[in-house]
Amino acid sequence: MVNFPEEQILRRMVVDNPWWSSGQIFDDYDSMKPRLFLHPFIELVTTLPKGRSVILLGPRRVGKTVMMFHTIKTLLASGVSSRKILYLSVDAPLYSGMTLEEMVDYLLKASKSDGSAGGYYIFFDEIQYLKDWETHLKVLCDSRRDMRFVASGSAAAALKMKSMESGAGRFTHFPLPPLLFCEYLTMVGAERLVAPVKVKWFGEMTDGYDAVDIVELNERFIDYINFGGYPEVVSSMQLRRNPGRYIKEDIVDKVLLKDLPGLYGIGDTRELYRLFIHMVFRSGEEFTYEDLSKESGIRKETLRRYIDYLESSFLIKVLHKIDENARRFQRVTTFKVYVTNPSIFAAVFSPLTQSDAAFNHMVETAVFCQFGADTDELYYSNWKKGRQNGEVDLVKLDMLSQKAARAVEIKWSDRYYRQISELKSLLTFMTANNLHRAVVTTITESGEKAIDSGSLQFVPTALYAYTKGRESVK
């Protein structure tokens, strides 16, 4: 292994930390619009108890590095000494073979700090490239309690599993999803299309949002489905003309052909790739291990591993099934899969229009994505009873009682606003679970309608997606 000269290592660190001399972050990062998650992230970083670190988790290219630099900018503006903010990208070849402890020592030397007096913020970017990083970070948390550590990485599989195993009580995870619809509107300068107002929600006035122009908002929502998941694609017309080159090659392919094989020693990457493409095409649909195995020729045990890998890498999200009485199944054989960002479909295949067969499933996928990390108690209901089949798109279970607390039916149609009787599955589920309220999305219609068992709240899908995104940020 090459031992690089110390002066070369220190010189690289000085270049990567321009605020030591200028007091400012790089211009290109400074000019980028911040994610709406920036403020809660900064609050977590600055209030974390001693002996703990923040792990920023998320897929490739969602802005983790940018958010780190925006956090550094905020720390500088709040009066933190520039020499006490230290940043290092772990995947740089110069640092190969170093431990985190050695990296910190070099950073202190490069910044001309002696490490005394405390108050340091240390940022490790792409930390998953360091072998046994979680053990080293745990040691740092214990031995350098006067320092706050922030780490980020894209290979969520390695990050989450290892940090949970070795960093219990020391690591706090902060998930950063692809762009939410509310963030997309801000980035394209279209936040004017939604206004905060008092809204009537199930008969009560509450703080909410209303569409200023529902027609244009719907147009933006369709644009979001096709191009809205990644900050760089949103801000670049050149990338939008060929999203496949950027999203597929720089994000999907690198995870499937580089990250996951490297982490798990996957030999047949083509098999994993075919499975993922199949799931992208059928995002929002129901799967069984039996059918998937027959269709793909992959053994069921291998399928389970692959699906776990894809989910932990933030490429897909598995949603589990409950029956018509909101009971969970002990043996999971049937499930839904959503891609974590609907624009992956457009990148892998082609942009969608409202007339495409896959469009409604991508609408459902886009709404699901707005829940962000808040999906632990989300399920879908599906049942077969005699000749009757039924399904409800999203059901939220109460964490304590495990009873249905909320139901959402996602429709890209105004028909059900006028034909409530056609919502047979939803009405059956509400009656079976003594659920008096449910949400149904539409294209343009909104308002509350009474039914025998309670009421239905109709809301345009784009507006509902915006609202759920705002709630996720909070």
Image (cartoon, rainbow, N blue to C red):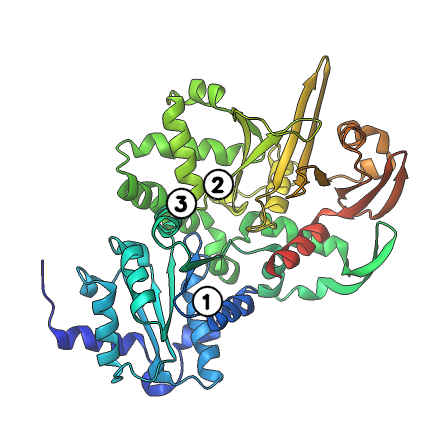
Q: Quadrant of the C terminus?
A: bottom right
Task: Name the residue beneath numbered marker 3.
Answer: 252
Q: Is residue 356 left or right of residue 157?
A: right
Residues packed near mark 1 inside 10 Å, few (<14), some (14 to 19) or many (20 plus) = many
In the image, is residue 442 above or below residue 453? below
Q: Is residue 19 left or right of residue 229?
A: left
Give, as a three-letter code, the residue at label 3: Val
Q: For mark 3, give the secondary structure.
A: helix
- The one nearer the camera, 14 or 462, is 14
Residue at 61%, 65% in the rendered image: 186
Give, as a three-letter code, the residue at label 2: Ile
Q: Earlier in the sequence, mark 2 or mark 3?
A: 3
Question: Residue 114 placed where, x, y %?
Answer: 25, 83
Q: CA distance from mark 3 to mark 1?
A: 21 Å
Residue at 86%, 46% in the rendered image: 448
Q: Quadrant of the N terminus?
A: bottom left
Residue at 18%, 60% in the rendered image: 96
Q: For mark 2, give the secondary structure.
A: strand
Mark in front: 3 vs 1: 1
Question: Residue 87 placed where, x, y %?
Answer: 33, 72
Q: CA distance from mark 1 to mark 2?
A: 23 Å
Mark in front: 2 vs 3: 2
Residues packed near mark 2 inside 10 Å, few (<14), some (14 to 19) or many (20 plus) = many
Among the 4 quarters of the image, the one containing residue 17: bottom left
Q: Is residue 409 visible?
A: no
Q: Point out which mark residue 316 bears.
A: 2
Task: Name the residue beneath numbered marker 1.
Answer: 67
